[in-house]
Amino acid sequence: KQWYQRRVRDALIQYYDYCNTNVESFISPLSNELRSNDPKSLSNFCSLYNEQLDKAFKLENPKRSKRTPLNNPWITNGIIASICTKDKLYDLWKTSQKSKCTISPPSVKRDECDCKICKNITTTYLKYSTHRKLLKHLINSAKRKYYGGKLSECFGDSKKTWEIINNIRGKGRREIKPSFILNDQRITERRLIANESNKYFVSIATKLTEKYTDSDVGIKSRHYGGRNKTIFIE
């Protein structure tokens, strides 16, 4: 039996993007199609609906990201776009740092130099730093709004209140259980995972013993075979 531990990654695959722009591009073509081609049956309507759904929302290249509402329920499409913009600005700043100034000596600071290279580095860093501060403020506001609404919903229920507080502190219970792949099947039962893990580690010594059971091969030839210049103590 071959099995391995599969860690549950926080990064999830996203196949569809339900942003407001895609919603608008989905509604208008669908309404035009329904007006021009009236579906005669429910199956025709479902096929037309699924076709327009894939055209509007389905991504050409699926994304793997932990910036999903499942991991961060307070996140929005605008915040995700702002995070991508921040990453691009950071890459531009790091790329601009590879260029070296040829006018001023190394002791002169970049913001004091008047060459194009130093000005470009300073400008790209200011853009990145300003956007990063605004994004941090936006994320904190989204978190306060989301968790504030959750706390107001469970007002008077101390148990649910403490569950939300522990979730904010990162001490909540894991909703996703650890999983293993055993014989091409995913298992999540803890007892079965422990038993299979125990079998695996116990079988390591047996497999090593079976691998080196040739009695004709001695210790010396096994470790030093064919090396005349090797010195060892008997």
Image (cartoon, rainbow, N blue to C red):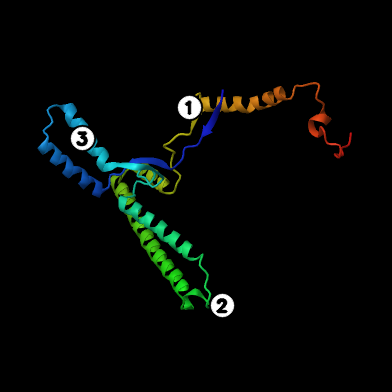
Does 109 appear above or below 76? below
Say whether disc 1 or disc 2 marks the residue closer to the N-terminus: 2
Residue 70 in view: no
Say how many tags the image has. Answer: 3
**Distance between the alpha carbons at the discs numbered 1 and 3:** 39 Å
Find residue 105 and name its label: 2
Say whether disc 1 or disc 3 marks the residue closer to the N-terminus: 3
Residue at the spot of label 3: 49
Does 72 appear above or below 85? above
Does 18 appear above or below 122? above
Residue nearest the viewer, comparing 173 with 154: 173
Say which quarter of the image contains residue 4: top right
Residue depicted at 27% across the width and 38% down the height: 54
Tell me residue 7's x, y (percent).
Answer: 50, 37
Q: Is residue 134 left or right of residue 191?
A: left
Q: Callout 1: few (<14), some (14-19), or many (20+) C-alpha neighbours within 10 Å?
A: few
Which amino acid does the dot numbered 2 rest on?
Answer: Pro
- The image quadrant where one finds the C terminus is top right
**Distance between the alpha carbons at the discs numbered 1 and 2:** 65 Å
Residue depicted at 20% across the width and 35% down the height: 49
Front tag of 1 and 2: 2
Say which quarter of the image contains residue 161: top left
Say which quarter of the image contains residue 171: top left
Residue at the spot of label 1: 189
Say whether disc 2 or disc 3 marks the residue closer to the N-terminus: 3
Disc 1 to disc 2: CB gap under 8 Å: no
Mark 2 falls on what kind of element? loop
Residue 8 in view: yes
